[in-house]
Amino acid sequence: MFGINSGRLIKNIHAEEAAVKLSAEKYGIHYIIIYPDLPTLREFYSFYIKNQIEHNKEIVLFSPFYETTDNVRQTLSGGHAAIKVSKYEEEKTLLITDALNQYFQKAEGEGIKNDWSFEKRMAEYVKKQGKNGLSVLGDMGVFQYKNKIKELVDYELSLPTKYDTDLKGFCIYNEKDFDRFAEEQKRKLIEHHGMAIII
Amino acid sequence: MASPRNNGILIVDDQRDIADLVKILLEREGYNAYAFYDPFMALDHFRENFKNFALVIADVRMPGMSGIELVSKIKEIEQETIAILISAVERDTVEKEIKRCNVEIAEIFQKPILLKKLRLCVDEHIKKTGIEEKEEEETKKSGLTSINGETN
């Protein structure tokens, strides 16, 4: 991962600083975020989600994989964020769903939900709700768990580099998962996304 | 004749507190327990010391390598290793994945783990292997030798 030299790769940015930077970015961005461990990821999503919901009047969809949705709720209720999780979930301002359910079909065969029409529909729904936009954060570790590395690369490359709706998309990778890609795959992924940020 | 394996237990969980807790619990019961937070390091250790291990306890969702994949690789090295999985997600989701990967898993424990239940499960599976009995016999034998040696 660290051997890749690209202007699109930002290294060693603090989790809170990354959250503030991404919060201020314009809609349409589709970035990769690489995290070293759960505490760092928690710090990032706590600051980011709080900012987007409470200050930017957004809807946030977060799909964790290496911690349960209940753990995420606990993290957001206390610590850096301390937001009213149940209130926002009831209002459907905050949507938390396991990455396995978000990216894979439950039916036999468990294929990948390989289009982003859901996010498009969500972005339209967001406008009707009088919100400014939608942020989608998903941990891609689920694809490695399902041994779908090639399919993950194909899925990522099928998504636009820049969305034409009021959507910010963040593909989140644990660094150990990202390191399992071949160098060529890493290069393709980083080049396809607007930016890759290592927190 | 193959040399008997030790009753060592490999514990692998990226949640350090859980790995450490299970290690302490099993050490108190007299097992040689080794905790790893990284599945790659655990696999390297197992590869070099597989004769010392009878059982592996692994978390299902770990970055870089899932517990199911780890168990699959461990069984390629030593098929007889007993595998117990621990998971924070629903059991049926884990079972589906085990079936897909075609890996033999002795038990699945859901987090938060009931430690007493886990200990009993480990005891039961270790007993089935007969390793404890073999070790007790060997201890007795060595004890006798020692007494004989002293009296001689």
Image (cartoon, coloured by chain):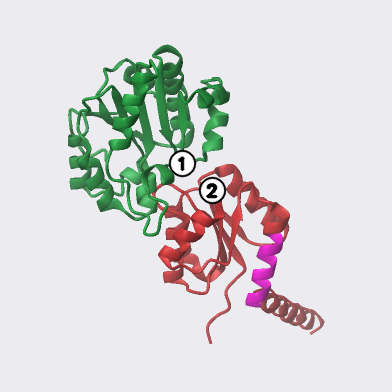
Chain colours: A green, B red
* Residue A129 included in the magenta stretch of the image: no
Crowd band around label 2 with a 10 angstrom C-alpha radius: few (<14), some (14–19), many (20+): some
Mark 2 = which residue?
A: B89
View extreme (front): residue: A128
- Residue A77 visible in image: yes
Q: Quadrant of residue A62?
A: top left
**Is residue A52 positioned above or below A137 on the image?**
above
Q: Quadrant of residue B91?
A: bottom right
Residue at (18, 46) in percent of width and height: A184
Return the residue nearer the eye: A168 or B43. A168
- Residue B45 visible in image: no
Tell me the distance, in whole angstroms, between the alpha carbons under discs 1 and 2.
9 Å
Q: Are marks 1 and 2 on the same chain?
A: no
Percent of width and height locating residue A8: 20, 29
Q: Which mark is residue A98?
A: 1
What residue range appears in magenta?
B119-130
Q: Are marks 1 and 2 in contact (CB under 8 Å)?
A: yes
Percent of width and height locating residue B124: 69, 69
Residue at (42, 26) in percent of width and height: A44
